[in-house]
Amino acid sequence: MRTSFLLSLLLLLLLSLATLSTAQNSVVTTGLWCVAKNNAEDSALQSALDWACGDGGANCSPIQSGAPCYDASDIQNTASYAFNDYFLKNGMTDDSCNFDNTAALTSLNPSFGNCKMPSRDICNSDNLAQKMHDLFINNPFDASKFGKIFTLCWQIWQKRNDFVFRNKIFSPHVVVACAATYHCAIPNRINSSPNSTSSINFDDSVIQQTVNVGAGFILRDNAGCPLIVSARNLGKTIVPIAEATALRDSLLKAQEMAIQDLLVEGDSSLIINCVNEKFKCPWRLLQIIQDIKKIASSFHHIHFQYNFHEANFVANTLANLGHHCAKPSF
């Protein structure tokens, strides 16, 4: 049950890339293409096209007269096919899509008419579910592999936001490099706590139009492997109560599992400071904060600390899932 829920979470993160893609025959595909810039001079494009089809080694047979991608009236379409073929054959790097600054990357499929531009799919919903099933259902759970995929999803989501909101094109190689760097740093962060310390991350999610609130948390062991994840729909309530409810739920589960040492992280400074008695607790939160303190007193060692929202993305994703839960899901 736990693995199936984690699998669903992974699919949700990966398929969120659909906002960058076009849908064809109900299949969501996200890819990158290298195309000619629409403001490039025709002479510059012709020169780059000649090089790509010559010394560059691109396959230009589909843009010859009579072929499906031949378009004598539009050098941009013609050059785009050659540029894209070279790009796919040469590592899909930024340098392989330059052509003297006449080309650029795009996530919008440039295919036209009967001409289909090939791409290297980033995410294809046709086979994604099967791949995730093979990794985490058909084979024994691999915590290291799971952690790497989650970190990669986080980096993909960051680059997706850069593209959508800041119009920044990203290179797949940069995404992988950033994910690898962050993943290597995680053990050092975990090892800064006692060896027996488990960890909790909690968060909420709000749908502004309906004021509907979801809550979620993830409980990990001392190696960072998930022990339990939870998503819950709280209906209409205020954000601090949702955050505090997620925290209380997580502590109850940790108590139920006889965990003794805990590091608790959340991105709500109000809740963290109320529990640590650095803030005077608002009256609406008083009862639930008292519950949290009472539960916390049952642990051998427990530490509450603030965590940046960007580092709390798993708990936030679970809270988003909570909107779709009729009852708490573990």
Image: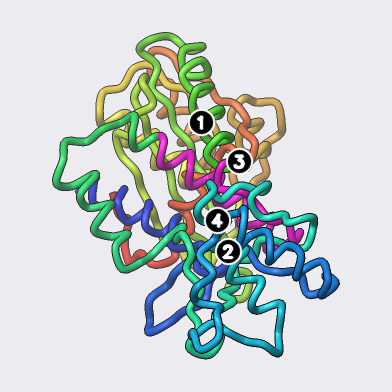
Mark 1, residue position: 180
Mark 1 surroundings within 10 Å by alpha-carbon count, few (fewer than 14), some (14 through 19), many (20 or more) = some
Q: Nearer the viewer, mark 2 or mark 4?
A: 4
Q: Nearer the viewer, mark 4 or mark 1?
A: 4
Residue name at image x 58 percent, y 37 percent: 311
Between 251 and 229, the one nearer to me in the picture? 229
Say what amino acid the circle numbered 1 marks: Ala
Mark 3, residue position: 174
> From the viewer's perspective, is residue 255 above or below residue 21?
above
Q: Secondary structure at mark 3?
A: helix
Residue name at image x 37 percent, y 57 percent: 11
Mark 4 surroundings within 10 Å by alpha-carbon count, few (fewer than 14), some (14 through 19), many (20 or more) = few
Say what amino acid the circle numbered 3 marks: Val
Res 243 seen here? no
Between 77 and 317, the one nearer to me in the picture? 77
Instruction: Please provide the residue range marked out in magenta.
Output: 148-174
Q: Secondary structure at mark 1?
A: helix
Mark 2 surroundings within 10 Å by alpha-carbon count, few (fewer than 14), some (14 through 19), many (20 or more) = many
How much space separates mark 2 and mark 4, taking CA atoms? 12 Å
Mark 3 surroundings within 10 Å by alpha-carbon count, few (fewer than 14), some (14 through 19), many (20 or more) = some
Chief secondary structure of the magenta portion: helix
Say what amino acid the circle numbered 4 marks: Gly
Residue name at image x 71 percent, y 90 percent: 73
How much space separates mark 4 and mark 1, taking CA atoms? 32 Å
- Dot 2 or dot 4, earlier in sequence: 4
Q: Nearer the viewer, mark 3 or mark 4?
A: 4
Q: Where residue 257 appears, x then y in whole percent? A: 25, 28
Mark 2, residue position: 84
Q: Secondary structure at mark 4?
A: loop
Residue 57 shows which numbered tag?
A: 4
